[in-house]
Image: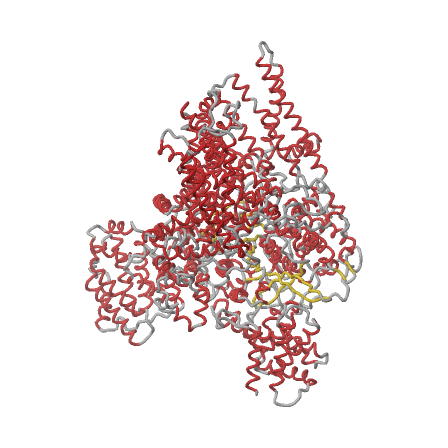
Amino acid sequence: MSRAEELWERLVRAALRRERFGMGTIGQPVGGIAGYVPSSLANNRDIDAILRAADEIQDEDPNVSRILCEHAYSLAQNLDPNSEGRGVLQFKTGLMSVIKQKLAKREVGTIDRSQDVARLQEFYKLYREKNNVDKLREEEMKLRELGVFSGNLGELERKTVKRKKVFGTLRVLGMVLEQLTEEIPVELKRVIDSDAAMTEDLIAYNIIPLDASTITNAIVSFPEVRASVSAIKYFRGLPKLPGDFSIPDTRSADLLDFLHYVFGFQKDNVSNQREHIVLLLANEQSRLGIPEGPEPKLDEAAVQKVFLKSLENYIKWCNYLCIQPVWSNLEAVSKEKKLLFVSLYFLIWGEAANMRFLPECLCYIFHHMVREMDEILRQQIAQPANSCCYENGVSFLDQVITPLYEVIAAEATNNDNGRAPHSSWRNYDDFNEYFWSLHCFELSWPWRKSSSFFQKPKPRSKNPLKSGGGKRQGKTSFVEHRTFFHLYHSFHRLWIFLVMMFQGLTIIAFNDGKLNSKTLREVLSLGPTYVVMKFIESVLDVIMMYGAYSTTRRLAVSRIFLRFVWFSVASVFISFLYVKALEEESKQNSNSVVFRLYLIVIGIYAGIQFFISFLMRIPACHHLINQCDRWSLIRFIKWMRQEHYYVGLGMYERTTDFFKYMVFWLIILSGKFAFAYFFQIKPLVKPTRTVVNMDPIQYSWHDFVSKNNHNALTVASLWAPVIAMYLLDIYIFYTILSAVWGFLLGARDRLGEIRSLDAVQKLFEEFPVAFMKTLHPVRTSTSSSSQVVEKNKYDAARFSPFWNEIIKNLREEDYLTNFEMELLFMPKNTGSLPLVQWPLFLLASKIFLAKDIAAESRDSQDELWERISRDDSMKYAVQECYHTLRFILTEILEAEGRIWVEMIYEGIESSIEKKSIHVDFQLNKLQLVISRVTALLGILNQAEKPEHEKGAIQAVQDLYDVVRHDVLTINMREHYEQWNNISKARTEGRLFANLKWPRDPELKAQIRRLHSLLTIKDSASNIPKNLEARRRLEFFTNSLFMDMPPARPVHEMLSFSVFTPYYSEIVLYSMNELLKKNEDGISILFYLQKIYPDEWKNFLARIGRDENAAETELYDSPSDILELRFWASYRGQTLARTVRGMMYYRKALMLQTYLERENAGDTESALSRMESTDTQGFELSPEARARADLKFTYVVTCQIYGKQKEEQKPEAADIALLMQRNEALRVAFIDVVETLKDGRVHTEYYSKLVKADINGKDKEIYAIKLPGNPKLGEGKPENQNHAIVFTRGNAIQTIDMNQDNYFEEALKVRNLLEEFHHDHGIRPPTILGVREHVFTGSVSSLASFMSNQESSFVTLGQRVLSNPLKVRMHYGHPDVFDRVFHITRGGISKASRIINISEDIYAGFNSTLRQGNITHHEYIQVGKGRDVGLNQIALFEGKVAGGNGEQVLSRDVYRLGQLFDFFRMMSFYFTTVGYYFCTMLTVLTIYIFLYGRAYLALSGVGETMQVRAKIMDNTALEAALNTQFLFQIGIFTAVPMILGFILEQGFLRAVVSFITMQLQLCTVFFTFSLGTKTHYFGRTILHGGAGYQATGRGFVVRHIKFSENYRLYSRSHFVKGLEVVLLLVVYLAYGYNDGGALSYILLTVSSWFMALSWLFAPYLFNPSGFEWQKIVEDFRDWTNWLLYRGGIGVKGEESWEAWWDEELAHIRTMRGRILETILSLRFFLFQYGVVYKLQVQGTDTSLTVYGLSWIVLAVLILLFKVFTFSQKISVNFQLLLRFIQGLSFLVVIAGLAAAVVITKLSISDIFACILAFVPTGWGILLIAAAWKPLVKKLGLWKSIRSIARLYDAGMGMLIFVPIAFLSWFPFISTFQTRLMFNQAFSRGLEISLILAGNNPNNGI
């Protein structure tokens, strides 16, 4: 029976454990019984620890294990007696099963539980003895002290882990004993307490163990940390804490304990902020200097700086509201009080949860809590604060934060998951802006919950035809109405300027360019235009504030109405004056009084406006005007001119910066207006006059509107495309100038100077000096020996460890082979050789070249040396061989042998002096010397053995003979005696008898190196071969010469965090994912092996396998499998890759600390200078590790990690594995704890931070309870916000999980952080922009287009945005934020639902509005992955375009548009929402042109015009269309790209790259991309519906099905493409063109190109898109999808009906329905025009013809219904239905035949009818879809759906047929593969093999 019991226990254990890593053989299995304690029990962390200890001692003593399990069970029972919590019942059942098995195992009878305590006590003693506890700590400490430089990392880690495990188990045993009994023997109690004190690093802590004394963590011994800890201690004057308030024995009470007690903050929040404040203070202190003395004290300046930085926003808030801060005099506030204020602020912030998005709300809370605290400070004993008290105790969270959270959550619920209009609910900004006025003090303190602010909205109506919700509180100070008018409202100055310039230029053009008094009078009509447009703006002000009047400040509302009244009066008055002035002018003998008055009014107004605008740009004047604020008139004028918000004050720049961007824009505007005048406006003057003055025209249709209006529609159709182009071409001029400017800036910054390996090799000797100057700030010192080391050797010795570490990391990343690594390594340069030794890749093969030159040379010595010295590397190789050989021979030889060496070298030096070396030595015999030296070195390289020693002596003798007899011809008489002794010794065989075998490591290294120098015959000029390794080395070495702030020593640098949000993306590829084949039989692993063949071989070599080994050979080794998973993951866009990259920061800081130690005077610096560049064991140095932890923190915020753990998802196991491999990695997540209370599920949310522990399981550090579900808005910013409390430092770098970093770039982070203290304008930087390298560009042609486009934006584009334009924002990652600035101002992103969908850019907006400054730096780069398939790219671009559509509506864009000066506002507009508007306008230009042409063609006007006056072929239209076409195909987008290529790759490579892109049809891609942006941007502004698109970041080489492409692009591209085709066909059929086909082609080529690109690009860029077998499968799949009827739960991917419903979901509001209806009316134009062109109607233009056409259409629809009548309904009268259908068919055929015979109806008329009715039907469909609820009520929805299905089938066939036709030709498929994967081919890849799915991957 025992066997069965044992198996049962194993089964239960396995069920509870579930080994978590991949294939079950990798890494440590986590957990056993302790594997998954339910989160509802996790509040008691003891259970977890007890079960882990039970697992640990199971084999040693099952009885004690049973006692522990029973105790854990009783704890769980006490916590949740009814098992109501989620997962608790299963946990208890499993645990009880394990206990029962343990009991059943016992062979004796019942268990005497009274003996359990005694057993435990006995086991405790035995366990201590067995593990030799007293010695354990001692051994570890010894090793740690030795290990600093020993490199014995493995041994130390093993000892540490063992010690931690043993003490961890002892701690649990002691704890259980104390819980079970109070009667513990005194001696044992003392031992237990003593052991517990030894577990300080088992107590969970983050960076500094503040709640435990430690001797292993060096961080607590740093003077600045000790000073910071002592600074926050309890000070005299603070009320005493009650005696029952517990404080750990290991530390004394501090300020945070006092605040904890008074306000009821959570324990973990207090612990978290304690460490946060200590680190802030310590890092601030370290910049000022390390405090000295046994009890270091914190400088007053450090406290002051932290105080002002942390409370700067609070001080500004008080000033803005004109209230007194909580201190009356800042000078009088003591250091302790300042720390108390800072501590309170951060404790509030740390527990504020979603309220962190409301920075001014936090100021309000802080303001009142400090006042409350001041009352308590007057008392003797601390009392809880009234505001946080409730019947159950004191809780800041429950009493202060939760009421706010509840009202915000209620508003968020009311937004209907983002579908409700923004104007109908309050978002985060609305709540925060409530605190921008003194009204907020009506909320009182404690909260007055009856206030309207806390009023929760009533749920919204579900009726789709009703808009608006129930009763609710209004918005605050801004309403995000969904309308295009926001573009005018926010940027009215730009539109006014453009309209006025157009008007002025048009007036001048119509006056034939004459500047006379008539022209001047007409130009003065700009006055009324200006005031009328300002009046429109004031009307928009009134309309846009609808919905916020009740809650907005009265002052702001009165300003809006005052401006409305003012501009109403002004527009009427000035327009009246101007009209009167014109009337006066037309009269004879008028004295122009009114005209003069008009001039005076206009002059005064324009003068004042210009004066104010210009003066406000000069900082000195700005300050002066601010001084004049006490004058009410000045204040009134400023207030009327610009709204006064809390944000956006003082938005001006330094005068020099202002002039820079002003000149930039003046150049653009002069070019734009010259182009507009000469190419757009002037050419249209003559045609316009002709059209206007033309006689009445005979229209070919029934005309309504064109009588007696001078052919206004014709004029409009001429001017409209030109005006559209006028509005858009300013962006084109901006693009060109910014590209040129960016190119020049880049050249000035020395970008691209090193762009090849050749340049790296030529400049290598300059690298050490450049490196020392910028990256390694070592105070110059001489060596400890008396000899002064040469400067370059010193620099080289300092540079070499960094360079070698870079090379080592490239090898570990598998970019280099072992041989390449050896060649690239740089010698230490710490030896006695009198020269710098350079890496072998510079010197390889140079000796042989020098030998050949010498052997063949007939020149003098000087000429010979001059020839060798032409190549620096050759010169260095010769010198090094000369000196190294001497060093080696001198070291290994003794007595006469050494004398011989000295004699030879003296002879050589003497010959050099006499310049007779070519005479004294036979240089043509050098080859013999080299061969003998090589032989000697080869032997010396081997192990020390007697036979090797003999061989070495023989080799030296051979060398002697060669030198003596073949090479040497010098006169020996000078040293006759010595030569004679040597000869004698040689003859007697004792010359080299005493050879010293080399044992010294340096000597051995020199022997190895010289041997390599003399044996490598191949040039190393192409080393490294890997392109990525080359690129990285080129960029790094280039950056050394760029301008960057010099780095400060590590202890003085700014501290920083890296922060990565993660949801559920791939962490680490599992073997299943790597081996899983797609439909073509391709696995990810196979794909990676083919795309990175060299890296695969390097990987195999690194893990000790043969480089031709198959991957199946790896499966027998768990460690190799794990390495394989990591290798693959490091080549994808995975979290593992990001974590590895970011952890390089820590590694770099550890190395830098280690190599700077001799300057720091620390314990580790007791070394000679020569040893100080030895980096072995730097990762082990306690001081280096502690210093890196003090300066760097990495937090990955894995939102659902808790849920993933609970569900035992592989992602959770992989994240745990990453934590184990990276000790400094911290993971934050939201833990959802469900419990049953009173029969109802009660959910609690916790923000938790964990790290890995010694058992490979998470160790919880902090758990901070949240007021509720933190996800109220957008997921990513909410995820960042909950975890930002766990970040540390002065700066924070935001990194996405598709990014990478490189070790060599991490070395530069200190320099980057110094930019915060460098001069970058009138304000210090708050965000540092960092350059990105897109690493996904090599996968396919699409990926390279995306990569090149992205690269040009993140380099050249952002360079210009930062300087000179000063409008760079935050475009996502990897920017570095001033952390304290941002966390006190709302965080690093905004989170309101939908409006903040592009959450990142709002951080830039917020930073700029709050007087921040955003810079851009290109000497450092971070890797970034991008989408690589067309569908991924389209989804991403759709998300960004939709996000920009939402930005148009946002308050941030409105305020920036209003508050920037004119030129900066233009920069901002054209680089954010304006770019998307111009993109949309590009497409609209084509529509405007084609609809204009359709109007001219169908109305007959075009023909008349052409015949009467040949005005159609005018230059203006051609200029507009050509410019539009160039913009459309991406030529202007390519300009920055080309200049970027030229700068960084060189001219020739840039030209080749550009031509390659053109051949790969990048123009098709850019045109297609234009459609994506236009569709999503336009639709978002019209209807909303922007959302986060999960694009997936995998490797895209799979074929996308036709139906999938159709679903994705049908409405965004295909429908619009077919509409353009329809317009072109109409124009072709009915347009009149004098020039024939050529004229038509020239006019419409851009339109055809756009239409065909939109229709066929998805299939052109689809892998295997033209393979016949795939086409057949696609057709089958498409028809199944089209015909499958939807239903409940059916998704859009499965059924056309479900998809169609999804496509209509965005039309939700009444406004949306009306707009959609208006837009759909354009489709009725076709029928109206075409029916009058039919031959059957002759010349009749009456409305009857149009009416008859509708009757025909109705008959056709009826027939369609007859033929598609539902078979389900007709089941009882099938025969009748078929009879009716047949009869109908015959009647139609007969009717058509009769009509053709009897009337004038022709076959062409039938086709024309199709052309007329198809768009009409589509228009009807669109209108019906817009009014779906109404149509459903009328019972017509099924009919509409049938027609819609027919349309989609038809459109699909139109696209499918050409693709199917081309698939018949096999070469098309080959050509397409070549087109898509050209880069891959050029690098020798096997994509064709991959796509064909051939079977070289059978083994997989």
Position of residue 1055 relative to residue 441, above or below, is below
Q: Quadrant of the N terminus?
A: bottom right
Where is residue 1642 shown, x and y percent of the image?
A: 38, 34
Q: Quadrant of the C terminus?
A: bottom left
The answer to whether residue 1152 is seen in the rendering is no
Quadrant in the rendering for residue 109: bottom right
> Colour mode?
secondary structure
Position of residue 115 relative to residue 1378, above or below, is below
Where is residue 224 shown, x and y percent of the image?
A: 61, 58
In the displayed image of the protein, which residue is found farthest to the right? Answer: 379
The answer to whether residue 552 is seen in the rendering is yes
In the displayed image of the protein, which residue is found farthest to the bottom? Answer: 108
Toward the viewer: 319 or 1140? Answer: 1140
Relative side of 185 to 1339, left or right: right
Toward the viewer: 1153 or 242? Answer: 242
Relative side of 1336 to 376, left or right: left
Relative side of 872 to 137, left or right: left
Toward the viewer: 1493 or 1849? Answer: 1849
Quadrant in the rendering for residue 1212: bottom right
Where is residue 1665 shown, x and y percent of the image?
A: 39, 53
